[in-house]
Image (cartoon, helix red, strand yellow):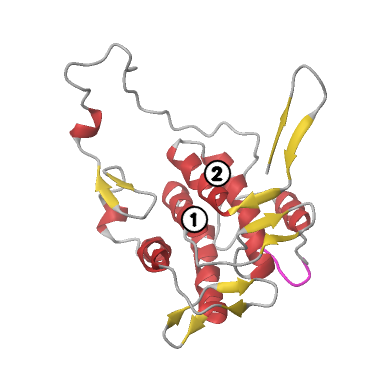
Amino acid sequence: MGCAASQENSIATVSSSSNTTQRQFAGVLVLAGEVDEAVCHHAFYYAIWKKYGVLPERFNWQLQAPDVSFYPLRPEFVESTYLLYTATKNPFYQHVGLEILESLETITRVKCGFATVHDVEDRSLEDRMESFFLSETLKYLYLLFDTDHPINKEEQERILFSTEGHIFPITSLFNTPPSPPSLLDPPLSILPRRNASFCETATEFSAGITPLRHSQMNHLFKTVGVDTNLHNWV
């Protein structure tokens, strides 16, 4: 969901759809120190999840309907939920994780595992389960709730998750310049942790309560067409 306008004229290019890879961006923002902005991005996809119980591959927020309707048990939204919890320790994100678990159990659970959702509207299923569901989706859900896991207690600043959920240790080799160093390589620096954002978040957290203001969540739910009489964020 983005807009770019030319400074030379009033023509603007607008995308009315959000796709599956954009759900990972909230996690990227967390790693860059833009936590408040990550909260906003995550809340938008949480609203879509509340509407269907799963996330369609592509959602058109202007039509308030999917452009591509299947859900292959992707991990990006779960990963962002986990990273936001590790950054904020806000119990709301464990509440979101519990909702995700309940949806997976209710909608996608079959005799021999979990199935891809063919259509999020009618919740019909396909006879397949992608490997990333085990290696990524369930891994991030497990870590979201196992707060005593060594990764969460001791290794948080010393490991890095790949895009496939593999865990890599961050060692001094990551900060070692090439030998001899190239004049074209900029010096390595640590990104500052900051929360400068146009997204106003709540200052106090309690279990199940969104870090966004009530009015903001209500606006997001209306944007994606969620019936707030049937679904809420608490």
**Residue occupying image coordinates x 19% and y 33%:** 173
Which residue sits furthest front?
A: 127
Disc 1 crowd, CA 10 A, few/some/many (<14, 14-19, 20+): many
Number of numbered tags placed on the structure image: 2
Residue lying farthest to the bottom in this orientation: 111
Considering depth in this image, is 47 or 201 the residue closer to the camera?
47
Q: CA distance from mark 1 to mark 2?
A: 13 Å
Q: Nearer the viewer, residue 116 or 94?
A: 116
Element class at badge 1 = helix
Question: Going 75% across and 63% down the picture, which residue do you hit?
Answer: 226
Q: How far across and down, in percent of the image, does residue 87 sit?
A: 44, 46
**Looking at the image, residue 201 lies above or below residue 99:** above
Amino acid carrying label 1: it is Glu
Question: Disc 2 marks which residue?
Answer: 38
Query: The N terminus appears in which quarter of the rendering?
Result: top right
Q: Earlier in the sequence, mark 1 or mark 2?
A: 2
Quick check: 13 left or right of 146?
right
Q: Quadrant of the C terminus?
A: bottom right
Q: Secondary structure at mark 2?
A: helix
The picture places residue 141, in percent across and down from the top left corner, at 42, 65
Picture coordinates of residue 10, whole percent (x, y)? 83, 24
Q: Check residue 76 in the rendering and tell me which mark sits there, or answer none.
A: 1
Residue interval drawn in magenta = 228-234
